Image (cartoon, rainbow, N blue to C red):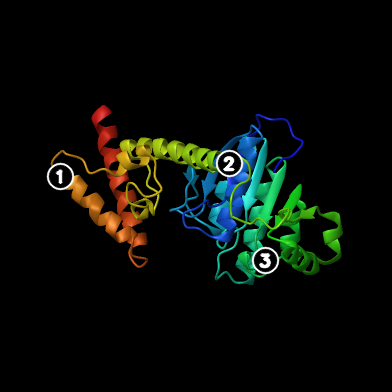
Amino acid sequence: MLAGRAPDMRVLVVGSLPPPVRARAEALRTEVVALLAEGHSVEVVAPDPVATAHRYLIATGIPGCLQLSRMVSGFDSVVVQVTPGLPVRARAGQLERTLSLLAFSFALGRGHQVVIRLERLEDLPGGAGGRAALRVWRAAERIVVGDEEARSAFVTAVGSEAERLIVSSPAAPDGDDDDGGWGERSDDSAANVLALVRARAARERRALAASDLAHVTGWERLASPGIAMTESDAALFTPAEAPRRPGDLARSVLAAADRRPSLWRLARAARLARRSFYALVRRDKWD
C-alpha cells in the first residue's frame, strides 16, 4: 500500500491477478484492493496472458523489461510483482540473468515511488543476491516480501547492503480468525476491484479485436463465458450469428496454433505477414 500518500494517484501495477489462483496473485490482488480503497487510480499490466488485467506484456525477460520501461514514466507510482519470467526467464543463464536485471533496474529507474513485491525468493531465478540484483533493489522505495521467513532469507541473500533498503512483510492478522476474507466490507471490496479490472480489460480487448491491429497470445484460453467473467467479457466471446467467412476460419486456425507451444511462433509470423499484406493493400488503395 502507498499509505500516507495523497489520494488520486495514478498507479501502475505490474503483475498477474487471478486467474490462475496462486499465492503471489492473491497477494497482489490484496494490494490492488488496498490501493483502490485509498482512492488511487490503478492500471494493471500482466505478464501472464490469461490473468485479469487492463493490458498485457508482449513478452517476458529482457523484451518485457524494455516494454515496461516505456510504460512507467506516465504514472505517479509503480508496483511490480516479481514473477518467474519477469524480470528473468526461468531457464536464463548467468549472462542473460545479469542483462535482464540490468534492463529491469533501468525500467524501474524511470518510474516514481517504486514498490517491488517478491512473494518468494524462488520467484526470481538465481535468488535475490548478486550485484545486478542489488541495482534492482536500490531502484525501489520499498520492497515487500511474502512473510517474515521470506524477509529473513532476503536479508541474508542480499547481505550488508540490505541495511540500506526498506524491506517489509505483510502484518500478521490479529486473533485466530483466519477465514480467508478481506476484512470489513470485504465482499464489496473484492467484487469492486475484479469488476473494475475486468470491465476495462473487456473494453480494451473489444477495441483491439475490432481494429485487427493487435493480438495477445492466450486470449483464446480465457475462461468460458459465465465463469468468473463480467457481462462485457461474455459478450466478447459469444459466437456471432453472421455466417462464417474465410477470415474467420483463418483466425480459428491461428488460435488453435497459439495453444500449441510448438506452433505459436509460426502463428505469430503468419499474423504479422497478414497484417503487413493488408497494410500494403490499404495504402495502395488510398494512394
Of 285 and 38, which appears nearest the observer? Answer: 38
Mark 2 element type: loop
The secondary structure type at the circle numbered 1 is: loop
Q: Marks 1/3: CA distance?
A: 49 Å
Q: Amino acid at mark 3?
A: Leu
Name the residue located 65 percent from the left edge and 29 percent from the top edge.
8
Q: Position of residue 157 (x, y in %)?
A: 77, 69
Give the mark toward the camera: 2 or 3.
3
In the rendered image, the residue lying farthest to the left is 243
Locate residue 201: give its quadrant: top left
82 vs 68, nearest the viewer:
82
- 60 displayed left or right of 154: left
- Residue at the image point whose x is 16% and y is 47% from the top: 246
**Residue with the mark numbered 3:** 121
Position of 128 with respect to 223 (left or right) is: right
User: Looking at the picture, which amino acid does disc 1 mark?
Assistant: Arg
